[in-house]
Structure formats: structure tokens, C-alpha cells
Image (cartoon, rainbow, N blue to C red):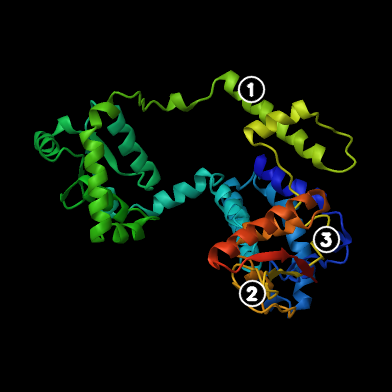
Amino acid sequence: MQVVFVYWFTVLYKTGSEWRADGTAVYYALNVDKMVTPIGQYLLEFPGLLKPLTHAVFWYEVIGPLLLFSPVFTGPIRTLTIVGFALFHLGIASCMKIGIFPYIGTLSMLGLLPPWFWEKIGDASKTKDRLGLRIYYNQDCGFCARSVGLIKTFFLLPKVELFPSTIDPSIERDMTLHNSWVLLDAKENRYFGFRGVIAALKRSPLFWPLASMLKLGWMAAIGEHLYSWVAIHRRVTCALPMSSDQTALKMSPIQNFFVLFLLVYVFFWNLATLPNTGIKFSERTRSIGYVLRLDQTWNMFALYPLKDDGWYVIPGRLKDGEVVDLDLDNDGARVTLDRPSSISQTYKNYRWRKYLDNLLSESIRSYRVYYAEYLCRAWNVRHNGSEIRRIRHHLYA
């Protein structure tokens, strides 16, 4: 439901005609030079494509969340929907520099992949080499039992067999000798320690490329060192409560009620952020969201995409009267009002762009002096004896 809130509430914010009528929202978004990438600039050469793309984005944010709850063909439909959202976010990331949000949006979807998807991967993993894989562990160590279970699950090896070491005396001897778990492949080759981890990864249908990386000398050495450290301290970890009983993962009625309360709270929080809903949160009520970091507003590119654009020019006058550019990347170059070839490249990263965008707001106008003081300090440190006397900054559109 939290994922649904992200898309449905951003749709409710998108009330501008650019989204709902004339379909120019993507065109305006790609004309924000301080965020657009070369791929986004290239798309502007195809105006006939941008209008249907605008409507596709809008309606996918409406219909996509519904498809996640499809009562028929749930597995394939949900999987295709999640793939669609991943492509949607990665497409945004390729066209606009908006920080880590597209990647978070993609990764958060992976937790919604249905059992159907994982079963298909499991079916694809039924090769002779994988079916013959066996892992032996110390049955007296709860940590060991849980660890091999996690490897079986997250390496996507559902058919691997797990055995306590006591069922085979030779395995028991090798485990004691190497102070390690024992992994046997279909050819009865035995692997110990971190080499066993690499052997398991090599047979994973999804993570097998990692095996080649981890076999590199320095990475293998680090892995063996970490495994040895865990093995040496196993007495401590074995004492920890590590029940493998799946019923331990079930939530109690109180926990379920608490999660339901938070879900309802977040829903009404989002309603309160919308204009003209009549729902208001007092400061005391909002404090719950701030403490738990459930505070959120999904008004991306709403009511319509940003239409104001430009770039900063920050001249500083030295004590000898010379005027220099205080941008840290330009480092004292001649001040010019010429438009940069790529405005988005004038920002170090997304957070710097957001910070400078925020400084334009009249509500935090007083913070501009602190940024100016920072630029002066940075200049004076880099240029000993060349002191800044006065600084001004301008935004040119």
C-alpha cells in the first residue's frame, strides 16, 4: 500500500492541463536544463512522441498499482507490472538527474515479486550440477543452521539439500579439521570456508557472475579472513537465539494492529498534503510521522513540471578590486554571463542542485548569507592572501 500511495497521490497532485489535457508535461520536464541529461535533450527532437509519452506516464501511475493486486494470473501480471515500473524509473533516470529516487523506486518493487516469479527461477535452476548440491553444517549451532538456510534461499538454490554433519563420519572429520561447513557438488568435490560460498554462488541462477569476482586473489583473501573470524567466534554466535522455526516469523495481533495503525496514519497524512481535502494534522499528530520518518509528500512534477530554469553566476570582488567567479569548479575563472553548454553539469551532484534551488525560495532567503560565507571561506583557504571583500550571486534564466 505504501508503494500504491507513491503513485496514486502523485497522480492526484498532477492537476495541471499539461498532464491531463494537452500532454505537454514531458516536453516541459525535458526542457529543465538543470536536470536534463543528453538522452533527454535528444528526445526533445521528437515532439510527436512526447505527448503520448506524457499520457502513458500519467495512466501507468493510475493503472499500474491496480495491476499489482490482479486476482487472475496474479504471478505473471504482477511480475510484468513490476518490470514496467522498473523500466519507467530507469527511463526517468536516463533522461533526468533527480537523485536516487528512480533507483529506490526500482529496488522497492523487488520486494513485491510474487512466488510465481521465484518458482520459475527455481524451475530454471534444476540442472544436474545444482540438483546434486549438498551442504553439511553443525547441527548444534543455531547460527549455522540459519546461515545455510539463508544461503539456500537468497542464492536461489531451492533444491540444495541441507544435512547435519553427524550423518557422515568423514564429513564430521573434515568439518572439525577445517573448522568449516562442507559443501559437496554433484561430482563429490568438497569445498570449505569461503571457497564453499564461491561454489554456491557459481551455481546460483542469478548471482553466478559474482563467483568470478570473488575468486580474485585479494577478494578471496578478504573472504577467507572474514569466514575464519566468524568460525573462530562461532561459540558466541551459536549461543544466540536463532530458531529456524518459520512460525517465529509470524506477527502477533498487537504487531499487526500497530502496522495497520501506521498504514492508516500514512494514508491520512497523504490526504492532508493534498489541497482542499479539509484534513489537517496538528503538530502533535504530525510528530509521530517525523519521529518514525513516515512524513512524505508525493508531488513530483506537480501540479505541472517546473517551468523556471537558469544557472547561477557568483562573482566575488577581491580586496585588490579584481572580480572572479567563486564557483568552486571554476576556481577563479573570468566571470561570464554566457549560457553553459550543459547547465546540469554545473552542479556537483543532485544534493547541491537541490540546495541551490532551495535558496531561491523567499521563505529561506536568510540562509543565502551562510552560503556566501562558505564560498568566501573556501576561496580564502585555497588562495592564501587573496581575500574576498564582497560577493553577489545571480540566477540567469
Mark 1 residue type: Phe
Residue in view at x 23 percent, y 46 percent? 225
Residue nearer the viewer, 282 or 205:
282
Is there CB contact under 8 Å for labels 2 and 1?
no
Mark 3 residue type: Trp
Mark 2 residue type: Ile
Residue in view at x 40 percent, y 49 percent? 122
Secondary structure under tag 2 reads helix
Q: Residues within 10 Å of mark 1 (few under 14, many from 20)?
A: few
Q: Where is residue 307 drawn, in percent x and y? A: 82, 65
Quarter holding residue 192 = top left
* Rendered position, 308 above or below 146: below
Comparing marks 2 and 1, which lies closer to the viewer? 2
Q: Where is residue 312 drawn, in percent x and y? A: 73, 68
Q: Earlier in the sequence, mark 1 or mark 3?
A: 3
In three-dimensional space, the C-alpha distance between marks 1 and 3, rounded to whole angstroms, equals: 38 Å
Task: Say left or right for 163 vs 357.
Answer: left
The label number, if any, that marks residue 39 in the structure image: 2
Is there CB contact under 8 Å for labels 1 and 3?
no
Comparing marks 2 and 3, which lies closer to the viewer? 2
Q: Earlier in the sequence, mark 2 or mark 1?
A: 2
Residue nearer the viewer, 161 or 254:
254
Secondary structure under tag 1 reads helix
Residue nearer the viewer, 383 or 227:
383
Q: Where is residue 42 drawn, in percent x and y? A: 68, 78
Q: Earlier in the sequence, mark 2 or mark 3?
A: 3
* Rendered position, 44 above or below 178: below
The label number, if any, that marks residue 257 in the structure image: 1
The label number, if any, that marks residue 182 in the structure image: none
Residue identified by numbered label 3: 19
Q: Residues within 10 Å of mark 3 (few under 14, many from 20)?
A: many
Count of all numbered marks drawn on residues in the image: 3
